[in-house]
Image (cartoon, rainbow, N blue to C red):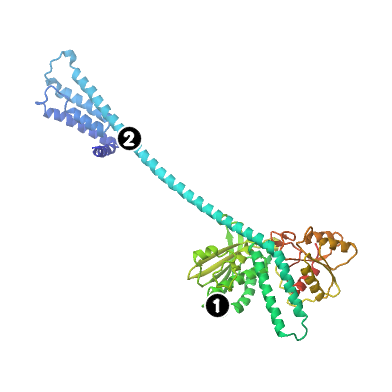
Amino acid sequence: MLKRLAIATGWARATRRSPGLRIGIALAACVLGVGGRLALDPYVSGVPFITLFGGIVICAFFAGFWPAMLTTTLGAIALEVLIMPGVAIVRPDDMNWLPTTFFLLTSLMIVLIIESVFRAHDDRMAVADQLAQLNADLDDLVAERTRQLEAEIADRQATEARLHQAEKLDAIGHLTGGIAHDFNNMLAIITGSLDLAKRRLGGQPDTRVVTHIDNAATAAERAASLTHRLLAYARKQPLAPRRLDVNALVGGVNVLLERTLGEQIRIDIQLDENVWPCHADQTQLETAIINLAINARDAMPDGGRLVIETGNATLDASYCDQHDDLAAGDYVQIAISDTGVGMSPEVQARALDPFFTTKDVGKGTGLGLSQVYGFLKQSAGHLNLYSEEGKGTTVKLYLPRSSASDIGQDAKPQDSIRFLPPQNLTVLVVEDDDGVRAMARASMIELGFIVHDVDSPQKALHLIQKGLVIDLLFTDVVMPKMNGRQLTEQLRKTRPDLKVLYTTGYTRNAILHNGVIDRNVVLLVKPYSIDDLADKVHVALNMTAS
């Protein structure tokens, strides 16, 4: 019943929207009521308006209040003229108005009741529509809020992942920094002593002794490389960034890669002629490219194609907001792609973790990618890793575009001629570790210097105050009570032209700012060979003091 009423009400809403149709219904209802009364006159004598009520009800429902009242009025007039004169109703003449008045009042009540019912039904339908709309809005609101919560959860998970990475990086930094200084001091003693021993073997040394020394030196170099890689991942490796021509650098590395990767690997270099210069440490960048190329070679055991591309890239704020320590702006991009075995999503998730490797035992330290990642982050750059199993891997390096202030800092090729220091120059060695100091003293004597050595900055100041004149200060950076930079500042108050060569296995900010070596500072990282020492002495003696 309710369903039929709803259908009828729907029809009524349709007819009530058209004024012409409402008037037509009113007239049709009037004709139906009057015609019916005329047809039934023999049977309903004495009730002149009875047939008109049906038309009024229909009109009130389908056309509304005013059309129903129009039907009532027109029907009353028609029946007064056609029926009322012949109705045999005994009433005084002064009461002839009573049937018509009663009819009009009754019709009005019927119309009002029907209109009220219809309006109530309309109100109920409106409430139902509003409720349905509210439910729909609520569903949309719930869906939207669910999406917001999912986005918030994703953001929280990403933030937690970044926090975990930062905490891991910080923990490794503390661990590495804590052991690097002492460990590199020990390696400096081993490396320097082996170098001195090999130099003093004489003209025709025993090849077995030389082999043993070379093996020990190789092991010491590998240990030093491991420490340096850890420092790079922890972003504590001293950097000397400068303006670099990326295309020239990649071209130079390509010559080395052709000899290193073997004939099975086809190298394809694609250089953008309009690539910007970048601001980075040349040695570390070359090492990063070589590490990635070796990783690519290992991922192509049956041979394949290695592509190295250069180009320009602009990272916008929306992208940089999703990555820590990354500023929007212009970057130089170096992309290294291979056609190797690729990585699974699980391997990709851990690819940058230190000591994580998929290689067999003894074939990798798991520090290649992590070292590159640490170097890029320390250089205010970025790394993106794309890989698909069975199709290969692409690693994209982003380095800051060099600014106008970097002009004049272009990397200069190192002098390949072995440096021989001037004779009879005086060097003061300041080193708190006895073994390292003895090795440094012996190395300086081997190079032909007159050497004085002390184990603290305070003793160095005392010697200078007593009148010792030196040509070069060779000092450790990290020492108790006074560091090497503070010692230099004290000495340059009276000797502003003093030449200084710093050495360290690990340093914080004595001669570095955010891991970048201060300008006009010459730093020799432990452990070092005598040739490394000679090269840095050459640079320090020709450096203008500041």
Horizontal and vertical percent for residue 55? 20, 31
Q: In which quarter of the image is the N terminus?
A: top left
Horizontal and vertical percent for residue 421? 81, 75
- Please name the amino acid that badge 2 sits on: Arg
Residues at marks 2 and 1, CA–CA distance in whole angstroms: 79 Å
Q: Residue furthest bottom?
A: 204
Residue at image position (71%, 82%) is 210
Q: Find disc 2 in the rendering and name its residue.
A: 124
Q: Find disc 1 in the rendering and name its residue.
A: 265
Residue at image position (58%, 60%) is 314
Q: Is residue 499 left or right of residue 270?
A: right
Q: Residues within 10 Å of mark 2 (few under 14, many from 20)?
A: few
Q: Quadrant of the C terminus?
A: bottom right
In this rendered view, identify the residue nearer to me: 515 or 112: 515
In this rendered view, identify the residue nearer to me: 285 or 225: 225
91 shown above or below 388 = above
Earlier in the chain: of badge 2 and badge 1, it is 2
Residue at image position (20%, 21%) is 100
- Please name the amino acid that badge 1 sits on: Ile
